[in-house]
Amino acid sequence: MPELSGQLGMSLRDAERALENAPGPAELLDATYADTHRFPPPAWALPTFVDAAGGSGMTYTPYRGDRAVREAVADNVSTVLGIPATGPTDVILTPGTQGALFVALAALLSPGDLVLLPDPDYLSTERMLRYFGAEVRRIPMVWPHEGDTGRGARPTLDLDALERAAAERPRLMVFSHPNNPTGAVYDEGTITAIADLARRFDFAVIADELYCRLVYDGETFHHIAALEGMAERTVTLLGPSKTESLSGYRLGVAVGPRPLVDAMEDVQSCTALRAPSYAQHLLARWIAEDGTFLERRLREYQALRDTTVKKLNDSSLFRVNASYGTAYVFPEVLTAASDQEVALALKEKAGVVVNPGYQFGPAGTGRMRLCFAQDEAVWDAALDRIIDVVGALGPA
């Protein structure tokens, strides 16, 4: 992504390495991901893994995953997605959801294909698209009016810009939902509009719904694959790494039409081979046994979100909307310092690691992503340090 070198004064990777290598206190709080010690996996996770590794699970599964596990996953995700016809041939298990995104893109794209991507969106997606030689068209999100931070104040897609881009006959649209980094949950009208355009202009969709069960305030989540005519042109990416804190087990799930899933398996067979074999068995219990666990996690995360949003907005150094999904907020930082300068200062002086906004696309500039799924005993003080350090950088 060489165009970023003008903004950053160095390449994207050099900027990120500068953040990685920057000095900081011995005890760093990494706010780029959740604290899985404070929020551990369900109690059944480790015993299930140990049982599989002790002999009940295959060492070498089919490339797309153990069939019995895929049958259970198909039943469970059908309930979530509202697609009752989903079967094990429509499911592939991958080494993490990012692995699912990679094999889906590899199966779908040829160099020069036009791909639509919201701005901002997940930090790795455009990099992968560029790797496969795609032409990326960013679709801007429309942000709430300044100071509007109440319920209903959420960023959403610019549907006029989306329709203009769709008329250019893209091969694919990729989007995270809930949106990573903003936490936006798109309303029914937005999801329906994407589906209408996909059918009218005949393009495929990859919906990264990794956070679709981490949704707050009673918000209704709309799955694009459940809409008429969309199951056969949509790959839905799911997984237990965030909601159930199972990121260390490296498990992802993709659901899509069988011919495309077959092609994804072909790619996986010559790259990562398969998802970790013993870990796959956790997915047979995923979703089906998470009810009480999920209710508690949502309450705890929402309380942390509310604390974070209030404290940042009260400081007058940030402007942030409450996220309706994910474990992130994406505040605007009201300082003249660059994203890189803010991130470096927070690591060195506040002992907090953050994702600078430029990682997520042009619309992310002037913001940063914070994961609020942290130990309450340390998070409040960390927010105080963040506020103090940004205040010392000076006003915009």
Image (cartoon, rainbow, N blue to C red):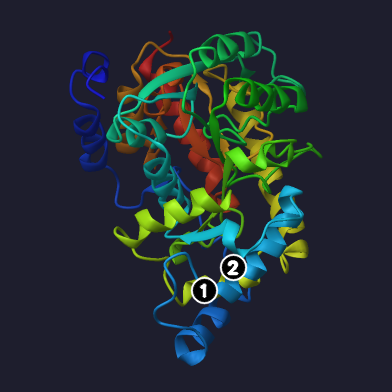
Q: Quadrant of residue 396?
A: top left
The outermost residue toward the right is 218
Q: Residue 211: where, in percent of width, then height? A: 61, 45
Q: Residue 238: where, in percent of width, then height? A: 57, 51
Residue flagged by tag 2: what amino acid is it? Arg
Few, some or many residues within 10 Å of mark 1 (<14, 14–19, 20+): many
Q: Quadrant of residue 184?
A: top right
Q: Is residue 37 left or right of residue 211?
A: left
Q: Is residue 199 left or right of residue 222?
A: left
Question: Judging from the image, what secondary structure is the residue with disc 1 in?
Answer: loop
Taking the spot 56% from the left edge, 55% from the top edge, the residue there is: 239
Q: Which residue is mark 1?
A: 66
Residue 42 visible somewhere in the drawing? no
Taking the spot 45% from the left edge, 21% from the top edge, the residue there is: 364
Q: Residue 281: where, in percent of width, then height? A: 55, 75
The outermost residue toward the bottom is 55
Residue 53 visible somewhere in the drawing? yes
In the foreground, 328 or 203: 203
Question: Judging from the image, what secondary structure is the residue with disc 2 in?
Answer: helix
The numbered mark at residue 70 is: 2
Label 1 and label 2: CA atoms lie apart by 6 Å
